[in-house]
Image: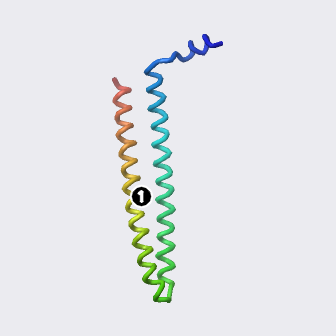
Amino acid sequence: MAASSRRKRPNSIGNLLGDVLDDTKDLVDDLVDRAKDAEGDLRRTARRVVDSRGRSLDDSDAGSGDDDFDSLRTALDDLTAKVNRLADLQAAKADTTSKKNRS
């Protein structure tokens, strides 16, 4: 049995590197998807905070609402930067892979 499985797919450095690249691509894709989901959740939360802030008549809530909004805005900016960085890494990896496949 072991000999027949070797004939189907011989062990080689090329196959190992290909598997590593495929797994890395899957990981980056998953990270980008999760970052997009987190960004969407954060945007919905920020909208809810802004909406509830507009309905509040209590002055004490208005000050803390501004702080909450600022912290959410900062978190959203950080998350957007991370998503953009991951997208750039994925694009660079795709370019490298396509160039390697052409050679």
6 above or below 21? above
Q: Quadrant of the N terminus?
A: top right
Please indicate whether residue 7 sits to the left or right of residue 14 in the image.
Answer: right
Q: Amino acid at mark 1?
A: Leu
Position of residue 24 measured from the top left corner of the image (x, y, whole percent): 46, 37
Please indicate whether residue 2 sits to the left or right of residue 37 in the image.
Answer: right
Position of residue 10 measured from the top left corner of the image (x, y, whole percent): 52, 15
Position of residue 72 measured from the top left corner of the image (x, y, whole percent): 43, 68
Q: Quadrant of residue 6?
A: top right
Q: Residue at x 41, y 78 (%)?
A: 66
Taking depth in this image into account, of 66 and 98 the one nearest to the observer is 66
48 above or below 42? below
Q: Quadrant of residue 78?
A: bottom left
Q: Residue at x 41, y 76 (%)?
A: 67
70 above or below 83? below
- How crowded is the residue under tag 1: few (<14 C-alpha within 10 Å), some, or many (20+)? some
Please indicate whether residue 14 sits to the left or right of residue 5 in the image.
Answer: left
Q: Which residue in the protein does label 1 denote?
A: 79
Q: Residue at x 42, y 64 (%)?
A: 75
Element marked by disc 1: helix
Position of residue 39 measured from the top left corner of the image (x, y, whole percent): 46, 59
* Color scheme of the displayed model: rainbow
Q: Quadrant of the C terminus?
A: top left
Residue that lies at the very extreme toward the right in this rendered image: 1
Q: Residue at x 46, y 89 (%)?
A: 59
